[in-house]
Amino acid sequence: MWLVYFLLWTAVTANGEPLYREIGDKAVLTPDSVESPIYSIVWKHGPDIAIEWYGNETFSYRQFKDRGSLDISTRALTIKGLTQDESGIYRAEINNKDTSNTQLQVISPVPKPNISVSCEMTYCVLTCEGNIKGAEPVTCWWRSGDIVWNSTNQHKITKEEKKSLFNCAFSNPVSFNGSEKVLNPFIERNGAPTFTVVGAILAMCFSCCCCCCCCKCLTKTRGIY
């Protein structure tokens, strides 16, 4: 179920800019088609030249010497072993004519989230937690049974909530990761509500203490007589 929603979400976002890739992955940037013959190709990263080709010679600069390559037939720039330093605007100049820009955004995969639970008397707040720095943009998802919805990283439930299990997930354009399930604190456990179970245990402890005190008192009374 998670996978279906993630694929639908990425299919929608894939139609727009920027082009997202995961750290360590590769990106293939393909420029607009240009009429042949082609006698020069210059790829720029921001204002700086990354790779250029004139006639029979190709020149690469900076990190693109080791991790960049140019396909002359397609004019595509391939970058391997991506780091966040490769994020930015790329533009190809073919035969000294500009083509459209491509914005490449290199991001981290999302972490596996954890759910913390904070309860008051009438409601509980579930918080989907994890370090998402460098993984933005991140979407938070919640799931209970077959129901999935995207929201903030917090979900509030009340005593009237009938759903028994919840889990959350983080997603971004390159990855998806879900948490373990947590039990609704208001739902019955083993035939009794959570808070009732706790109360019953405390009551039993109190009863045991009372019994012990009574026994000691009876023993002392018998000793006197």
Image (cartoon, rainbow, N blue to C red):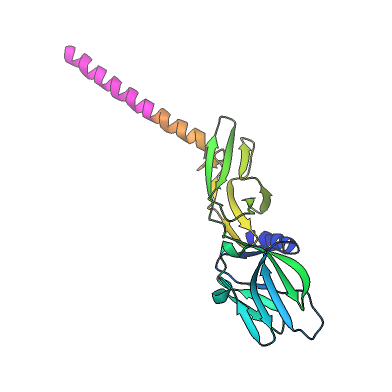
What is the count of numbered marks? 0
Indicate whether residue 198 is drawn in magenta: no
Residue furthest out toward the right: 35
Task: Kindly tell me whether residue 3 is visible in this rendering.
Answer: yes
Residue furthest out toward the top: 225
The residue lying at 37 percent from left, 29 percent from top is 205
Task: Decide: is 128 above or below 17.
Answer: above
Q: Pick the residue in front: 64 or 210.
A: 64
Which image quarter holds the C terminus? top left
Q: Pick the residue in front: 148 or 133.
A: 133
Q: Quadrant of residue 203?
A: top left
Task: Decide: is 180 above or below 23.
Answer: above
The residue lying at 17 percent from left, 12 percent from top is 224
User: What x and y, as percent, mark residue 31?
Assistant: 74, 74
Task: Decide: is 76 above or below 181.
Answer: below
User: What x and y, as percent, mark residue 105?
Assistant: 64, 62
The residue lying at 66 percent from left, 75 percent from top is 77
Report the predominant secondary structure element of the magenta stretch: helix
Q: Is residue 13 left or right of residue 69?
A: right
User: What x and y, as percent, mark residue 7?
Assistant: 68, 63
Q: Pick the residue in front: 199 or 39.
A: 39
Q: Quadrant of residue 202?
A: top left
Task: Kindly tell me whether residue 144 is visible in this rendering.
Answer: no
Residues in magenta, as a range = 205-225
Which image quarter holds the N terminus? bottom right
Q: Is residue 175 left or right of residue 203?
A: right
Q: Pick the residue in front: 148 or 75.
A: 75
Task: Decide: is 187 above or below 105.
Answer: above
Residue furthest out toward the bottom: 56
User: What x and y, as percent, mark residue 82?
Assistant: 57, 68
